[in-house]
Amino acid sequence: MSRVAMVFPYFRTKSPMEILFPPLGAASLAGQLRKLRIETRIFDCTFGTVRQIHKALNAYQPDIVGIYSMVSLTRNTFQIAEMLRASLPDSLIVAGGPLPTLYPKRYARQFDAVFRGESDLSFPRFCRDFFEQRISRERLGELPLDTYEGLFIQDHELEIDNPTVHYTERNVQSFPLPDRSDFNHAAYQKVWLQKDGSKTTSIITTLGCPFSCDFCSRPVFGSVLRLRNLDAVFEEIEQIRLLGYDSLWIADDNFTLNLPYLKEFCRHMAGRKINWSCLSRVTGIDAGTARLMKEAGCQRVYLGLETGSQATLQLMNKKATLEEGINAVHQFRTAGIEVAAFFIVGYPGETVSSIEETFRLALTLPLDYISFNVPFPLPGSKLFDRVSGVDEAKDWSKENEVTFVYRSEFDARWLGRRIRQTMRAFAEKK
Ligand code: B12
């Protein structure tokens, strides 16, 4: 029997900052693989231990193991790959996701193959050909390796470095729905209910973002916006509802980018009694749009306000003004939508006084939630190339910590103190 195991190597930490969602990348690929009638199982490590997952994978005896990786999951990814290499020596071990996309060479040392970028069609086709032609790990070279988009292999005999692909909107609209059937929904819902009083899960409706914020990296989906077919999105939402969820986190890079799409979505969602939250840009939001979103169940928007200083916004290449940010907050609040704002403090090139402007803005705006971070130079971002002394040995898996992973001109302890003071003042004000 030919089997593919898809592994999401995240083990829950129970940190108060932790946010849990089943991995949509694995679910999307499982949908595609099963469409090709390939037996597939997702091993979501979230609620397990390394031992349990290892045991379950050994029992499943997969021919191909695909492991997702990103910046915070590198250690886990390599640990699992190493264990599997020892216990399943004949299985093909493949990496994919944001970090292998950026650094395929690092992964190619330990993995038989790496898929860079969007892999919805290329990886399943590769698996199908592997099984149909009865290929083994040692005979990979017999496959038409040049034809799989994004494939990267570097071993003694093979050197493959195929260009990545951004599937066209037409392609994207023909994809099957992500297959969520392997996830432990009861466990996800229990955690969400305890923490938030809702049963929330994530969904993606658009791919790509055309903006080039200095600190952002879009390793997989790039800069061309593609819209999923809304009928498919509504079918997926119905499936999600039947799984017991009552609330959605729309994980698009920026859900309010294409206003006609957003409005169409809202018209269909009105009356469905499902709450949702999303990330939004501050530009282009007027009172009518905000009202429509509210009527459609939008409970909260997350705005990357980033800073209280116009000069720092420019350093970040946000292509938005302070005024637009302030206006968006008011539009959403007036419509009855909660606003959560993200701020970054200590940006390279800013000053102590611009940092203070940020703290001031956070305390003067009518915001429901605020969070502060020091810059996090994501591999693949312009910021990453610009800052010096990025220390990849530091623990990047800690979310939202006030710790610099590069040599900063600002004192992390001072920033930490100012953040805590501002958070306290914010809590008292509320
Ligand atoms: C939702 C989300 C989260 C959620 C949950 C993540 C989850 N459980 O899946 C939360 C809010 C918890 C989160 C947290 C963080 N996130 Co996040 N997140 C996202 C977001 C917005 C969507 C992820 C998603 O569902 N994508 C849709 C699926 C379909 O795409 P995909 O997973 O990339 O899968 C495709 C390919 O990568 C590939 N693929 C995926 N897996 C595999 C496996 C194999 C074998 C193969 C061949 C191919 C393959 O095929 C898929 C289909 O094309 C992405 C940005 C984005 N647009 O993708 C950031 C993103 C993944 N996050 C990122 C970061 C940095 C973080 C944090 C570290 C942020 C922080 N400082 O706190 C934390 C770390 C959390 C952790 N637990 O480790 C970065 C990763 C950057 C990098 N270079 O590694 C991204 C890319 C955002 C960005 N702009 O940089 N995140």
Image (spheres, grey):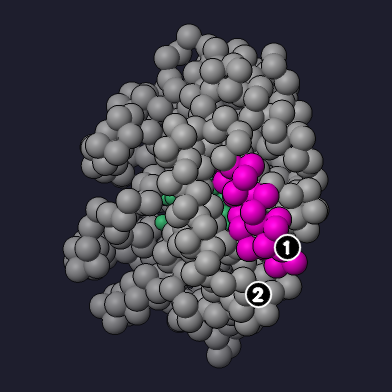
What is the x, y in percent for residue 327? 71, 28
Magenta stretch: includes residue 347: yes
Res 108 seen here: no
Q: Nearer the viewer, residue 55 or 382?
A: 382
Res 396 seen here: yes
Q: What residue type is labelled 1?
A: Glu
What is the x, y in percent for residue 273? 42, 14
Position of 130 with respect to 211 (left or right) is: left
Residue 121's disc is: none
Q: Which residue is drawn at 54% across and 33% down?
A: 367
Q: Residue at x 31, y 55 (%)?
A: 15
What is the x, y in percent for residue 403? 49, 69
The secondary structure type at the circle numbered 1 is loop
Residue count near mark 1 (Cα–Cα under 10 Å), binned few <14, some 14–19, many ≥20? some
- Look at the picture and state if 137 lies above or below 239: below
Q: Which amino acid does label 2 sit on?
A: Glu
Magenta stretch: includes residue 382: no
Q: Where on the picture, by quarter, is residue 187? A: top left
Q: How many marks?
A: 2
Q: Residue at x 50, y 49 (%)?
A: 422
- Residue for badge 2: 409
How far apart in space, not on screen, are marks 2 and 1 (Cα)? Answer: 10 Å
Q: Residue at x 33, y 34 (%)?
A: 196
- Look at the picture and state if 270 lies above or below 79: above
Q: Nearer the viewer, residue 344 or 260?
A: 344
Q: Where on the picture, by quarter, is residue 264? A: top right
- Residue for badge 1: 350
Quadrant of the rendering where the C terminus is positioned: top left
Q: Which of 164 and 90 is in front in this view?
A: 164
Q: What stretch is highlighted in magenta?
A: 341-362
Disc nearer the start of the sequence (2/1): 1
| Identity of the residue furthest to the bottom in this view | 156
